[in-house]
Image (tube, grey):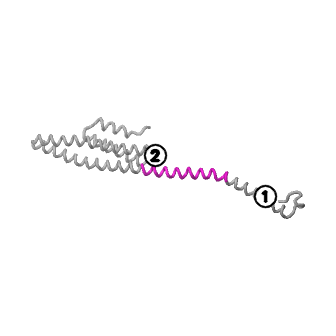
Amino acid sequence: PRLAGSASLGRREREFLRVSHAAARLRRVLSILAIIALPLTAAAAYGANQWVTRGARDREIAERVREAETILTRARERDLALEVSRRRSFAAFDAGRLDDGEREWDRVASSLDELEADFDLAQQEFERALLLDGSRVDVRRRFAEAIYDAALVAARDHRLPRRDALFRRLRVPA
């Protein structure tokens, strides 16, 4: 840029003015870039934090679901063993071995309590996962399946108040 009266300036003074103007332009550009960079940096930091947080949350949910599935596997195994004990008890009663039948039936009753406890623990793990992210349809589905399985076992074993409570948990509000 030409300044009024710059023609009377010497070569050094004109060079000084040119460098000064260039430095002023550079400061303006850097100031504008700093103003633009600040929100971009904040957005990037926020996005990175969300990404890290989501990853940690997803890992915790996966751990809760794995734990619930492990407990449900144990419950299914316990349920199979319970059915064997139930049949042994009935066979002993049918054969007239009342003491054997009673002992085996006591095992059935004890196993029922343990089976219910397993279903309850699995449901708690699913609930813990859903507390971290209630929008996870896959976890909600597995949770509902675990409740339903527990309700069927309760119905089979004539534990009607428990069955009714479990079926109530499955109701979706309108």
Q: Are marks 2 and 1 in contact (CB under 8 Å)?
A: no
Residue 2: image x %, image y %?
85, 59
The residue that label 2 is drawn on is 135
Residue 150: image x %, image y %?
31, 43
The kind of residue tagged 1 is: Ser
User: Along the polypeptide, which appears first: circle 2 or circle 1?
Assistant: 1
Residue sitting at 36 percent across and 37 percent down?
A: 168
Q: Residues within 10 Å of mark 2 (few under 14, many from 20)?
A: few
The kind of residue tagged 2 is: Ser
The residue that label 1 is drawn on is 20
In which quadrant of the rendered image does the C terminus lie?
top left
Residue sitting at 78 percent across and 60 percent down?
A: 19
Q: Nearer the viewer, mark 2 or mark 1?
A: 1
Say if 110 sits above or below 33 in the image: above
Residue at the far top in the pictured view: 161
Give the CA separation, mark 2 to mark 1. 59 Å
Towards the viewer: 106 or 88: 106
Residue sitting at 40 percent across and 51 percent down?
A: 62
Towards the viewer: 169 or 66: 66
In which quadrant of the rendered image does the N terminus lie?
bottom right
Q: Which residues are magenta?
A: 34-60
Dominant secondary structure (helix, strand or loop) of the stretch shown in magenta: helix
Q: Would residue 154 appear left or right of 93 to someone viewing this image?
A: right
